[in-house]
Image (cartoon, helix red, strand yellow):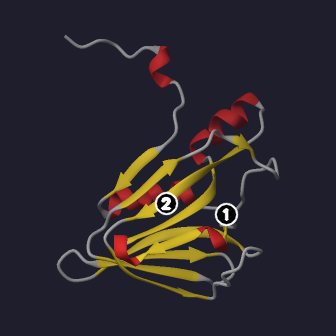
Amino acid sequence: MSEDARFSDGVERPLRLVARDEEDLKVLSALVQDAVFPASEMLWRPGERRFAILLNRFRWEDKPAAERRGRDFERVQAVLDFEDVTGVASQGVVRDADTVLSLLSLEWEAGEDGTGALVLTLAGDGAIKVDVEALEVILRDVTRPYRAPSRKAPEHDG
């Protein structure tokens, strides 16, 4: 016998999502849009076939509630983790502790037999390409949400 959902079932929890196909990846891309991170917070471990970024993502999933309740917008630190990585390359990315990057989108470029590349498009014409044997990207929040320093939601033309 099934039960109706209870109000307590809707308690906010940290996100932990996995993308294994293009449709899943579109959801992750929307959730990490406008995430910011120091260039020094990227980690490529060839021996583990893993690439990860510690980023500060805007909580798009919370934006309607924040607007409705008139409270500040939030960000949260999250790890964007790429599995089965065979190579990582970047263009227009300065890798020093003072450089802060802004993630605009995450897209899949399919190759042969399930292989492909994940392309992270950054503000300012930068890009990171992550070659993988199979599409598997994990997004997981690792801190409690905090007030967005700007107290505003990111805006986009169009």
**Mark 2 surroundings within 10 Å by alpha-carbon count, few (fewer than 14), some (14 through 19), many (20 or more):** many
Q: What secondary structure is marked by label 1?
A: strand
The CA distance from mark 2 to mark 1 is: 12 Å
Classify residue 27 by image quadrant.
bottom left
Which SS class for mark 2?
strand
Residue at image coords 49%, 43%: 15
**Residue flagged by tag 2: what amino acid is it?**
Leu
Q: What is the number of the mark on residue 36? A: 1
Q: Which quadrant holds the C terminus?
A: bottom right
Judge left or right: residue 118 versus residue 144.
Answer: left
Indicate whether 53 appears above or below 142. Answer: below
Per the image, the residue denoted by label 2 is 80
Q: Amino acid at mark 1?
A: Val
Query: What residue is drawn where x is 35% and y is 70%?
Result: 48
Residue 156 in the image: x percent, y percent? Answer: 69, 64
**Residue 130 appears at what percent x and percent y?**
42, 78
Q: Residues within 10 Å of mark 1 (few under 14, many from 20)?
A: many
Q: Position of residue 90 (x, y in %)?
A: 54, 86
Quadrant location, the N terminus: top left
**104 is higher (above) or lower (below) than 2:** below
Q: Nearer the viewer, residue 36 or 109?
A: 36
Residue beneath the point at 56% across and 43% down: 61
Question: At which x and y percent is residue 112?
Answer: 20, 83
